[in-house]
Amino acid sequence: MEKAFLSENSRGSIMILALIILGVMVFSSTYLLSFTVAGLKTVESYDAGVRAYYLAEAGISEAVFKLKNDAAWKSAFETMPSEEDPACSAWSIPPYSRLDALGSGNSYEITIANSGCAKAEITATARISAGDNAVARRVVKLNVFKPMGSPAAQYGILSSGASDNVEISAANPLRIHSGDFLSNGVLYVKDGSIVQTDGKVLAAAGVVFSSGGQIEGTVCSPDVCDEDCTASSECPPAAIAPPFLDFTSSEPDSYISRAQNSDCGSVRSDGKVNCLFTPDEFEAMLWSHYPQFSSPAGTVIYVTGDANIRAGQELTINGVLASGRDINLGTSLCWTRSEYPYLRCGFAQVVVSRPGEPEDALSGLLAFRKINTSSWLGIGFSALNVEGLIYSGDETKLSSIAAPIVVHGGIVAKKLTLSSLWNGIDIYLNPDVIVDVFGSSEYSPIISIDHWEEEY
């Protein structure tokens, strides 16, 4: 009887243990299954979120395209300021939606909020199905603007990069005649530099003096407000939107198009007649007209890469020299090529002349990226004499020049560095030159990005 009782107890214990193990296995399996399902949902949600982000980016791209090309959007966006509405507050563009993008049920909506004359905040909200009736949502915001064609007409010097400073070092004197000097960034005046101006020196982010640097004239900045800075908008001065030039678009007013329509047949020996050059074609032409080269009057010469003015070259541009990259002036004392006489040495000199006809003829040195000089620029009493605009989309650096620099027009650069100019630089503001190059009171063809923001 006792053995039978123990046997029955053992069988009961084993059954209970088996049920416990089975329960644990069922629980574990259920947990692992739910964990796997949750993981799959997470992956699906992440994938939907990524697709929603790129869909929102596509919405931003379409909005920018429509601002450039859709007649109704472009006309509204480019509303001109008027006496009644100087801030262009009246223009508007209705919201725009695209359904079933990247699959059924997916969509994005674009809204354009007016923030000024040719200024807007674009918001693209994208929605992607994430399964089980869930929706992934992403929002991308972009602030864009088009600068006016000639906001620089009152400035002898305009440095337009808000985060790019102006550095004037060992330049004595820098004289600006009949115009203002505006830096959107910090203006550094140091190492014995003297800045003289008939107008005002406006520095939106402040002025820093060191090692004997000084300004002779009215200074208007957050830290220096001279008594002549009377208008509240001038001290501290407001930064202005940087002006841009159209170098390479297919528009007839772009500089590459102007060069294609200019006649350089009289100075070319390669069988071509237009004024569009590769860097090697440009240097070959200069070599064949050494030491003095004078461009045909009223032409726009466009070099698709760097335009290098080397040793001993005396260059006269009767119109415009534009570069798709950099303009380098006096960058080497000697110059070698495979053609006779193989080696040439000397100091370069550059003159830019404004043609008399037509009255709005273009003239200047225009670089998509940078303008650089070195100590091999300057002959006698002249290194650089420009009747036109000096423009760079990035930096203009005039440095280590032993002869004077004279500009009748203006200088516009994103960043400006003037150093070791002990024979001085004189800038005589000519608003007509600046307006002719940038265009009169029209918006630039280029849409610029001011701010990018993402939301989830």
Image (cartoon, grey):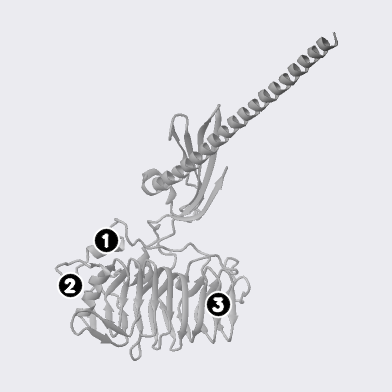
The mark lying in front, picked from 2 and 1, is 2
Can you see residue 151?
Answer: yes
At label 2, the amino acid type is Arg
Tally the marks. Answer: 3
Q: Residue at x 47, y 43 (%)?
A: 54
- Disc on the earlier residue, 1 or 3: 3
Q: Residues within 10 Å of mark 3 (few under 14, many from 20)?
A: many
Q: Which residue is more in the foreground, 113 or 275?
A: 275
The reply to whether residue 431 is in sight is no
Structural distance between the alpha carbons of marks 2 and 1: 18 Å
Q: What is the number of the mark on residue 188?
A: 3
Q: Quadrant of the N terminus?
A: top right
| Rendering coords of residue 375 (x, y %) | 39, 85
The residue that label 2 is drawn on is: 268
Q: Is residue 424 left or right of residue 304?
A: right
The quadrant the C terminus occupies is top right
Please state the horizontal and vertical placement of residue 95, each as a whole percent of the image: 48, 39
Taking the spot 43% from the left edge, 45% from the top edge, the residue there is 63
Q: CA distance from mark 1 to mark 3?
A: 38 Å
- The amino acid type, in three-letter code, at marker 3 is Tyr
What residue is disc 1 on? Answer: 257
